[in-house]
């Protein structure tokens, strides 16, 4: 099993959905990624920053799932990053009510010494210069995965283009792929993105699944049709965490193995949305994960006779 480095936010979130409302709860992209990757017993280090207001129990929770938190800087007199969001009835759109960067504004990521030779790096959604700085500290990773969003395309284009040249896989949603390339066709968008650096392009389509592109090959994994989506926060991060965790566990970074990794990521994301925040991931068992992977298999397997 190879080691995994994860950089991203560790945060307080306040979430409002048609089903209810939370006060400040544990959130952040790196939190979701870490809890998801932990399902594969991947030896992972979280690289992030929190304030003195961040409860020690949250760090202990992450540690108890096998995530090394020594790369999470605690700024004693600072405040933790805070995000508040409200979902509309269809759950596909949300309004950001607050983004308080706090200690994240001056974040200088430091990868723990004993993780600098890790094989897998997951650059969670953050300023592209912060993502580059993490890569500068790594000796020779075999797989670098990048998550980003429209905000960075609009505000830090040059830095985003630079970090994209250094990654193997990019994970973005369909609208972001279109914005990044100016192409409506996702096939064309994926081709253009590959010309920008990443050899593998994952395009997430929410409840409609995810596509993986590599040269002339394409793979599609559905999302599990769920009766009820309770809270979509962190679904994309959970997907990325499952993808990276599975690859780090299997140490096989081929296209064929990435197909399996995408199904693992999709299965984990389907759990994430069932409850508020990290609640469902926190208590997820391997048996539940396996049974859901079985459901994914049944969802897409069919016999066809060609005469
Ligand atoms: P997602 O639902 O995949 O967009 O991820 C939600 C998580 O991202 C939440 O737990 C937030 O704490 C975190 N988040 C929200 N806004 C930002 C931002 N601008 N930069 C980094 N992380 C963010």
Image (cartoon, helix red, strand yellow):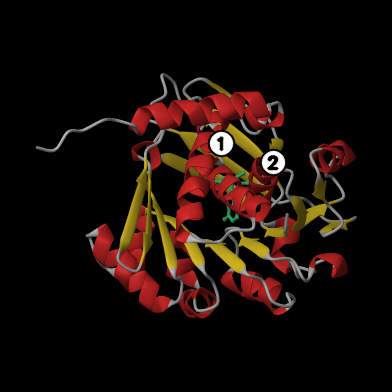
Q: Nearer the viewer, residue 227 or 221?
A: 221
Residue 284, position in %: x, y?
67, 27
* Residue at screen point 83% across, 56% down: 78
* Residue at screen point 38% across, 72% down: 194
Residue 282, position in %: x, y?
71, 31
Up the image or down, 144 lies above or below 267; here it is below
Q: Residue 183 sits in which quadrant?
A: bottom left
Q: Residue furthest front?
A: 307
Q: Which residue is mark 1?
A: 268
Say whether mark 1 is within 8 Å of ligand 1.
no
Quick one: quadrant of the N terminus?
A: bottom right
Does label 2 or label 1 sit earlier along the sequence?
Answer: 2
Q: Secondary structure at mark 1?
A: helix
Measure the alpha-carbon separation of dots 2 and 1. 10 Å
Residue 274 seen in render: no
* Residue at screen point 86% across, 66% down: 114
Residue 159 seen in render: yes
Up the image or down, 75 lies above or below 141; here it is above
Q: Secondary structure at mark 2?
A: helix
Determine whether, in the image, residue 63 is placed left or right of residue 194.
Answer: right
Q: Nearer the viewer, residue 52 or 228?
A: 228
Q: Residues within 10 Å of mark 2 (few under 14, many from 20)?
A: many
Residue 25, position in %: x, y?
70, 34
Residue 236, position in %: x, y?
51, 46
* Residue at screen point 50% across, 24% down: 230
Quick one: quadrant of the C terminus?
A: top left
Q: Which residue is mark 2?
A: 35
Q: Residue 186 sits in which quadrant?
A: bottom left
């Amino acid at each position: 099993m190879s080691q995994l480095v994860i950089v991203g936010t560790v945060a307080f979130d306040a979430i409002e959905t048609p089903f209810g409302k939370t006060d400040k709860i544990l959130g952040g992209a790196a939190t979701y990624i870490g809890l998801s990757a932990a399902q594969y017993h991947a030896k992972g280090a979280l690289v992030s920053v929190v304030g003195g207001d961040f409860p020690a129990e949250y760090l202990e929770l992450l540690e108890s799932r096998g995530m090394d938190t020594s790369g999470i800087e605690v700024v004693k007199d600072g405040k933790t990053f805070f995000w508040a969001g409200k979902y509309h009835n269809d759950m596909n759109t949300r309004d950001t009510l607050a983004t308080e960067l706090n200690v994240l504004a001056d974040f200088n990521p430091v990868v723990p010494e004993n993780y600098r030779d890790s094989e897998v790096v997951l650059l969670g959604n953050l300023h592209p210069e912060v993502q580059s700085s993490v890569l500068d500290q790594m000796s020779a990773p075999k797989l670098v995965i990048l998550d980003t969003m429209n905000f960075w395309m609009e505000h830090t284009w040059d830095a985003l283009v630079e970090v994209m040249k250094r990654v193997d896989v990019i994970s973005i949603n369909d609208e972001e792929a279109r914005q990044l390339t100016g192409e409506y066709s996702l096939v064309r968008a994926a081709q253009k993105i590959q010309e920008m650096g990443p050899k593998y392009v994952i395009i997430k389509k929410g409840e409609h699944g995810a596509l993986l592109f590599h040269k002339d090959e394409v793979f599609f994994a559905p999302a599990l049709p769920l009766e009820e989506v309770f809270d979509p926060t962190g679904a994309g991060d959970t997907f990325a965490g499952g993808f990276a965790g599975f690859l780090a566990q299997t140490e096989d970074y081929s296209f064929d193995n990435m197909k399996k990794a995408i199904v693992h990521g999709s299965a984990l994301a389907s759990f994430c949305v069932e409850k508020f925040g990290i609640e469902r991931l926190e208590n997820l068992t391997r048996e539940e994960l396996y049974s859901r992977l079985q459901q994914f298999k049944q969802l897409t397997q069919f016999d066809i006779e060609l005469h």
